Image (spheres, helix red, strand yellow):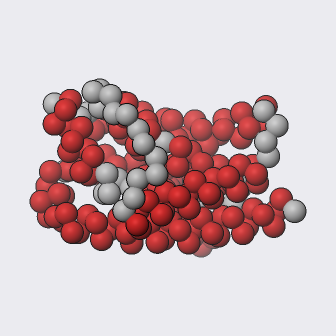
Amino acid sequence: MLSFDLKDLKEIGTATMVLFAVIDIIGSIPLIIELKQKAGVIEAKKASLVSLFLMIGFLFVGESILLLIGIDVASFAIAGSFILFFLALEMVLGIKLYKDNMPQTASIVPLAFPIIAGAGSMTSLLSLRAEFASQNIVVAIVINIIVVYLTLRLTNRIERILGPTGIAIIRKVFGIILLAIAVKLFKTNVSIGL
């Protein structure tokens, strides 16, 4: 039976917020609506399950892959902090630094990968793993995938409720949180790497 102490709950909360900010499923609602219009249907369950398996798989196998190519986790976490920093800048400043060509298929590519389980979330997972217990990160992934699933199911309703201004505000708030997290990850892992 799983039991969580205060430290575990704090780690789960922090990891959940980091992944929520990086995945930015609320900020992706306009993109999801565009994908629905192009593809016709988005399968929320399929996109969520594929994202879940990709993220959990990378959490456990990602470090081995890095070791195989000779990169330590602290170095990868520092590189990841830069990616998080630039993602946060995109969210806060409303600019687009990364350009993706969107294929017509929607549920798996580009929704599950790279929108939900993309470079930012993969980098975040390894960065979090450098600081937190793996089981706490898995709980945070599951919580986020539940939020992703519900958001995908309720996209049109959420868009009507929040409106463009509400979505923009949420995106900027989580951008600032993500910016602070990027700085913290950088500081922590630079001290480990030295």
Residue name at image x 37 percent, y 69 percent: 172
Q: Quadrant of residue 103?
A: top left
Tell me: residue 24, above or below residue 17.
above
Residue 13 at what x, y percent from top left? Answer: 51, 66
Q: Quadrant of residue 11?
A: bottom right
Residue name at image x 72 percent, y 69 percent: 187
Residue 113 at what x, y percent from top left? Answer: 43, 36
Q: How many marks?
A: 0
- With 161 as the anchor, is 84 left or right in this view? right
Closest to the observer: 101 or 160? 101
Residue name at image x 19 percent, y 50 percent: 154
Res. 13 visible in picture: no
- With 65 as the anchor, is 165 left or right in this view? left
Res. 73 visible in picture: yes
Residue 84 at what x, y percent from top left? Answer: 55, 58
Tell me: residue 164, above or below residue 64.
below
Most extreme residue toward the right is: 194
- With 91 as the anchor, is 128 left or right in this view? right
- With 120 as the anchor, is 70 left or right in this view? right
Tell me: residue 191, above or below residue 101.
below
Residue name at image x 25 percent, y 33 percent: 43
Residue 194 at what x, y percent from top left? Answer: 87, 62
